[in-house]
Image: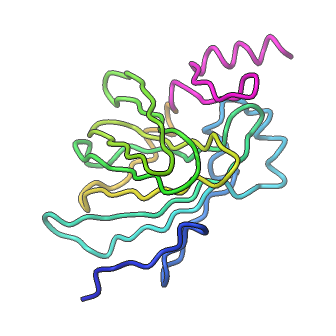
Amino acid sequence: MNLSLPFHVADGMIAGHRPMERHLRDVAAAFADQAAAANLAADNPLLYYVTMIDEHNGVGALHYALGVLLPGKVGAEYYMTKGHLHAWRPAAEVYIGLAGQGMMLLEHAETGECSTAPLAANTVVYVPGHMAHRTVNTGSEPLVYWGILSSDAGHDYGAVGERNFRQVVVEVDGQPVVMERADFLARLEAQR
């Protein structure tokens, strides 16, 4: 049994595996600025791709994925993943930053408590169970990361899609700022 997985950090590919791609139309509902998302919808840019390795199952098995989140913004909001909870809520996950600059938005499924963690080359983010998580690229290069989770975890995108995240990451004066979604929407409305 070959236990090594050759991958290339530069392009975020795992040899012999095809990544799942997410374009703007797949993620558009996650952005607070729906007008900016609608303006880019025709171009439908690629936001990220993930190669999931879920061939090992059973008690104690792990799944893992190599993700690449491209740089860019929809209006003032940085490109981000859809975000998810685990179908088995107690399941934790570990993200290892390999290249680029970004952060992880975290929101507890029951309490709604929010926090962020930096995700960049040579950093590790531990995502506890019951925690919705979304990756955001705040840099000018692709954010490449390795995610490791229990094979029992599963992914629940629906719960996040119904209520979205309470916080957004936006560019303010050239810097990434974490802001309450409601405050950001009020700020947009005041600018229009």
Q: Which of the two residues, 89 or 180, is positioned nearer the viewer here?
A: 180
Q: Which residues are magenta?
A: 165-192
Q: Residue at x 28, y 54 (%)?
A: 153
Task: Identify whether 130 is placed above or below 115.
Answer: below
**Looking at the rendering, in which quadrant would you find the N terminus?**
bottom left
Q: Position of residue 183 (x, y in %)?
A: 63, 14
Q: Is residue 42 left or right of residue 49?
A: right
Q: Residue at x 61, y 16 (%)?
A: 182
Q: Position of residue 186 (x, y in %)?
A: 70, 13
Task: Identify whether 22 is placed above or below 39.
Answer: below
Task: Identify whether 177 is placed above or below 96.
Answer: above
**Looking at the rendering, in which quadrant would you find the C terminus?**
top right
Q: Residue at x 46, y 38 (%)?
A: 160
Q: Position of residue 101 (x, y in %)?
A: 58, 45
Q: Which of the two residues, 110 or 8, is positioned nearer the viewer here?
A: 8
| Magenta residue check for 59 | no
Q: Position of residue 122 (x, y in %)?
A: 44, 50
Task: Find residue 36 and report its image quarter.
Answer: top right
Q: Which of the two residues, 20 or 141, is positioned nearer the viewer here?
A: 141
| Magenta residue check for 168 | yes
